[in-house]
Structures are given as structure tokens and as C-alpha cells.
Amino acid sequence: MALMAKGEAARRLAGAVLGACLAGAALGPTGAKAQEAAAQQEVYDNATSTRNGGVAASSIANTLPRRGDPYGIRQTLARHGFSFDVIYTGEVLGNVKGGLRRGSLYGGKLEANFAGDLEKALGLPGLSFYVNAFQIHQTRGINRNLVGNLNTISAIEALPSTRLSEAWLEQRLFGGLASIRFGQLAADTEFTIANYSLPFMSSDWPGIMADNLPGGGAAYPFATPGIRLRIDPDKQSSLLFGLYNGDPAGPSSNPETRNRTGTNFRMKDPALLLAEYQYRTNQGDKDTGLARIVRLGGWSHLGRFDSQRFDVNGLSLASPGSVGIAARYRGDAGLYGIIDQQLYRPEGGSPNDGIAMFTRLFVSPNDRNLIGLFWDAGILASGLVPGRPNDQFGVTFLYAKLGRDAAAYDRDFVAQNGLGRSKASGELSVEFSYVAEIRHGWTIQPSITHVVRPGGGRARIEPTTGLALPPPKDATVLGLRTTIFY
């Protein structure tokens, strides 16, 4: 009962954060000029912009003959309010030490985006749309087959498929003071983001949500039906609220195989709610102070979640006398805080130049979640290599601490199977990365990632024989990624 009470208290606390954010929206000033799009919306800004002939500023098309548009298709679409872009990401990853086994693999993701300004195209004030799809081609995953990690090593890892991602309409309201987005949505495009983490290969939806939520939540490679409200009470502040279907694939040991094309459009599962407050300073290119973004948020899932240790009779699930049916808890929740802080801004530099750091901290109840705490942080240097103004390099670490009951279950399991002493505690991974611009819109990125206690140090079961095995050894992964944006 004490464990259930603590979990319920955490869930109520997250609910209080949601309520506080709603209250802030209601009390915020009205009539203010809408804040320019937040940094995490840049991909959508590029897609929906019809300026510059429909070509995003960061596109390789700007360096090609006739700006990569020999037949004028992009210019014609742009005149009517439509635009598109294509992004290819390919990478070679090799596990050279530890993990599940040594080996290497190639993986790739081709992403196509199409957007429209329906005010310009059809005269519908403030209305726009956006659609994107992925073609994912990698036959094996670095996580699934080589390392056995909890934290992300490659943010594009997913089973091979061609799938719809997002497909939504957005209506701006009150002169841009607010907007409502509805349709097929991915929460990780707007929530839980640290801007200065984005250049790293491991930058992703946080592991505490990917591992704890059904199907990993409304995040890559999934999107799910939902609605998002954004309010910009002044140019420094934003409030975001999201309501999503809480299980993008449905119950499955491998959700990606159950919703392989992204077209399940599930709408009857218990809801996932998110709320986030953002405060920004010195984000303009003409500002001279150090840029900063602070985000505070919370989430709540209205479904039911299995105990990480106990069965319905209160026995350990690892006990020979257990019935094997986990006790269930009503609801789940979490709180988080994120800081992006520029540490050095060169004279005349933008918020993305110089030296910057980020950190994210997430917590969730220990009784029903595999991960009870997630913390990542990093430091990024941009434009500091002589003669290479667009190169970036840095280091980031990710730490996922197992929930109290998940670690206790491992102790029970290890003792029951005679594996000695449990090593379950949490997983730490560190990534060193350099992003080199080969040509405007084309980068090459070598990286080294070291994973300490893959899988959090938990014992595991060999899938073909069913034998209990000790946890994987510390792993070292070498990577090389290329990204082309057209």
C-alpha cells in the first residue's frame, strides 16, 4: 500500500503541474505580438516557408545550379503556398567491444515533408497543413542486436518500413497569439526538447518515456491522433498542451511490427497528456547577451501499468510461487525540467554560435516504471574551428536509473537463477561527436559512444534457449553519419 501511495502522490504532483500551466495560460496577457517559432519548430518552418522560392535556407539546393530546381517545380508550388523538402540520414555503426556481441551495420532514413499555407492557397486565414513520411532501411538495430542498451545511441533506429509520420492541420488564432494543431501528431517534435542536444546522434525522446510508455509513446517512429494547443502570451514565453492517444500501436511485444505503416490511427486507448512552459531570452541574432531557454513540464497517462516487481498476490514475479500476473496500478506520470544555456557568444554571433550546454532531468514513480530517473547533459561548441564556421563538436552523457522495484526484481531474479550478485542500477552512456560541413546542407559526423552497464546492468534471458544470462558488458560503439538536406 505504501508503494501505491507514493506512486499516486507522484501522479498527482504531475497533474498539479498540468493544472498550473493551464492556469498560467488563462492569466497570461492578451493582445501581445506572437512569439516567433521556437527553435524546435525549425523543420516545420522550413517546410511551410514559401519565401526564397520555397527553398529552406539550410538546404543543399541553394548551392546547386538553378538552386536545385531546374524545372521550376519548387518555385511554382511556392507561389501557390506549397513547399516540400527531403532529408536523407545514413550511418555506419560498429560495436567494437562488449554489449551483446561485436558487429557493424548500416542504417538509413529518407524523410519527405510537404506543407501548405492554406491562407495563401485557398484564402483560409491562419490555416496550414503538414505531412511527412519515412522510408527506414536498416536490417538490424544497434540496440536490439549488438548492445542491448536503454539509452539512445542512434536516434534513427527503427525496424525497416515505409511509414506515415505526421499529418495535421494548424489554425492560428488571435493574430498569432495562439494556435491549435490537430491530426496525426508526434509529441517529440515539440515537447521535451533541448535545442543544444540536437546535433548529437543520441538526441531523442527521453529514454524514461520511450521505455515506460506503451509503444514508446507518441514519438519516432510513431505518430498518433492528437491535438496540441500553443499559447504565446509574450515574446519570451510559450505554453504548450498536448492530448494524444496513449498507445500508438496497441499491446505487442514489438509495437513497430503492429503499426508498421503508421496508419493504424488508434483513438480509443487511454490518453497521454503533456504540458510544457518555455521561457526564452536573447534568442535574436542581434541580441548580445547569452541565450537561454528554460522548460518545465509534466505528463500523465490515464491507462493501467504493471508493477515492476510484484504479482497480484504480492509475491515477487521472480518467485517460483508467483502466478506470473503482475499487479496493476492506475495511471502513470512524470515531471521534467530542461535548460539550454549559451556559455560564450562571439561578437556578432547568434544563439547557435560559440559554446553552449544543455541538461534535462525527468522523474517518474518507481513502482510501475522500468526507469525512475533520467538525466542527460552536454556541451557543444559551434563555429570555433578556424576556416570552418559551420562545424560543431561536443560531448553528451545520458543516465537512466532503474526504478526501485525494477532493480529489486532483478535482485530476486538473479538470486533465483544462481547468477551471483545483481548489478542492476542504471545505464550511463557518453557520446563524443564532430559534425563537419562538407557542403552547405551536407554534413559528415564521426562519433564514439561508450555504454556503461548496457540495459542498466540487468540479467537477461537468452531468447532461443530461455536460459538466464548475466548482463551485457560495457560497450564501445564507433559511428559515422551523413545527412543531406534538400
Image (spheres, rainbow, N blue to C red):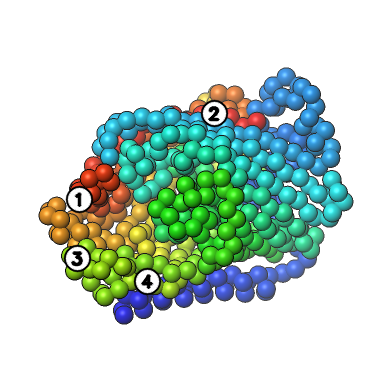
Element type where label 4 sits in the image: strand
Nearest the eye: 162 or 449:
162
**Which residue is at a point 40% across and 41% down the rendered structure image?**
153
Which mark is first along the chain, 4 or 1? 4
- Spatial CA distance of label 2 from label 4 is 47 Å
Element type where label 3 sits in the image: loop
Residue found at the far right of this picture: 123
Which mark is first along the chain, 4 or 3? 3
Nearest the eye: 272 or 7:
272
- Spatial CA distance of label 3 from label 4 is 18 Å
Residue type at numbered disc 4: Arg
Nearest the eye: 148 or 179:
148
Q: Which residue is mark 3?
A: 319
The circle drawn on residue 468 is 1
- Spatial CA distance of label 1 from label 3 is 14 Å
Q: Which residue is mark 2?
A: 443
Locate residue 350, reporting x and y percent.
62, 41
Residue type at numbered disc 3: Ser
Which mark is first along the chain, 1 or 2? 2
Element type where label 2 sits in the image: strand
Q: Could you classify mark 1 by the number of other residues whose Cα lies within 10 Å: few (under 14), some (14-19), or many (20 or more)? A: some
**Which residue is at a point 26% across and 75% down the rendered structure image?**
313
Residue type at numbered disc 1: Ala
Locate residue 326, reporting x and y percent.
32, 68
Q: Which residue is mark 4?
A: 328
Residue 65 horizontal side relative to residue 205, left or right: right
Element type where label 1 sits in the image: strand
